[in-house]
Amino acid sequence: MSISISAIRREREGPMGPRRNPMFRTMLAVAVLLTAIPNLASAQSKPKGARVAVNGMQMYYEVSGKGAPLIVLHGAYMNIPSMGAIIPKLAKTHQVYALEFQGHGRTTDIDRPITYPHLADDVAAFMDAVGLKKADVFGYSMGAAAALQLAIRHPAKVDKLAVASASYDLEGLQPEFKEFIPHMKVEMFLEMPFAKEYRKLAANPDGFPELVRKLIALEKEPMAWGEQVKAMKTPVLVIVGDADVSTLEHSVSLFRLLGGGGPGDIGKPLSASRLAVLPASSHTAVITQVDLLHAFIEPFLKGVTPKGMFAAQ
């Protein structure tokens, strides 16, 4: 890491001070994560990427593996390498299309806000551009919310959907995070290690401040998708850390809106959607647990359901 955590702490304590500002500590954790994650996949051979014209931008993507198509969507401030080893792991059994969103990684930015509907429409346009009529989708964090919007806005394009650390309503965020959103400033992010990492891949190396401005605005965008989620027919795997940015109650609510949470073993079929809670896992720790994530995602995408004691053998 090119900048020590102590230096960042001295420079970016925030309005509440380092001890009283839990979200500043979260930002430091994100900085460490986004600097370290690329090393998780360093031993893997890197697939060749390409760019395609999507809604006025040049969207970068990589294709790897063979099998049924699976689109992978990264989180805010991330890119394909920072998603780590989950991509090559999934590529062992799927043809993975890993995308980089507007202004992220090697994808160009355009004069347009970053919103979840925009991100979802970009994925849909990407699928049209590369000839993908339908695919499974795995999204993390911002990519998970974009994936939910993709299934809401373009349901015919999504077969099964796995979302890790997803939110569908701002009221479901942890209180500490909601309280911190109004205090977010571009300057808080400019000395973070991932600000320098951004320059290594970016189509515009000087575009990081503008990306931060758009992502802060995204945090303030209205989000109340309960009725839209309830109307979804797409099977969804909801993955959440037990110390995630969203509350556990919010994730359970999302699962119930999707038709999950009813009793098994009483003759009724289980919901097509599923819920997985990762223990001792913060928001940034979710994406690092590759084997555990894969153990949840792969059976879901293949339609494998554990048999209960009373199931027919």
Image: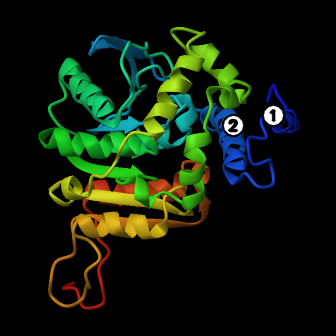
The quarter of the rendered structure image containing the C terminus is: bottom left
Amino acid found under the numbered disc labelled 2: Ala
The residue at which mark 2 appears reads as 31
The answer to whether 84 appears left or right of 66 in the picture is: right
Amino acid found under the numbered disc labelled 1: Ile
- Judging from the image, what secondary structure is the residue with disc 2 in? helix
The answer to whether 212 appears left or right of 98 in the picture is: right
Q: Residue at x 81, y 34 (%)?
A: 8
Quadrant position of residue 135? top left
Residue 241, placed above or below residue 44 = below
Say if mark 2 contacts mark 1, CB within 8 Å: yes
Mark toward the start of the polypeptide (2 vs 1): 1
Is residue 289 in view from this perspective? no
Q: Residue at x 41, y 65 (%)?
A: 250
Residue 131, placed above or below residue 22 = above
Q: Residue furthest left?
A: 156
Q: Disc 2 to disc 1, how far (Cα)?
A: 10 Å
Q: Residue at x 87, y 38 (%)?
A: 6
Q: Name the foreground residue: 284 vs 160.
A: 284
The quarter of the rendered structure image containing the N terminus is: top right
Indicate which label's residue lies in the foreground, 2 or 1. Answer: 1
**Percent position of residue 242, x then y:** 55, 66
The residue at which mark 1 appears reads as 8
Q: Residue at x 15, y 57 (%)?
A: 231
Quadrant position of residue 69? top left
Residue 17, placed above or below residue 207 = below
Residue 231, placed above or below residue 255 = above
Other-residue count near label 2 (Cα within 10 Å), few / some / many at <14 / 14–19 / ≥20? many
- Judging from the image, what secondary structure is the residue with disc 1 in? helix
Other-residue count near label 1 (Cα within 10 Å), few / some / many at <14 / 14–19 / ≥20? some
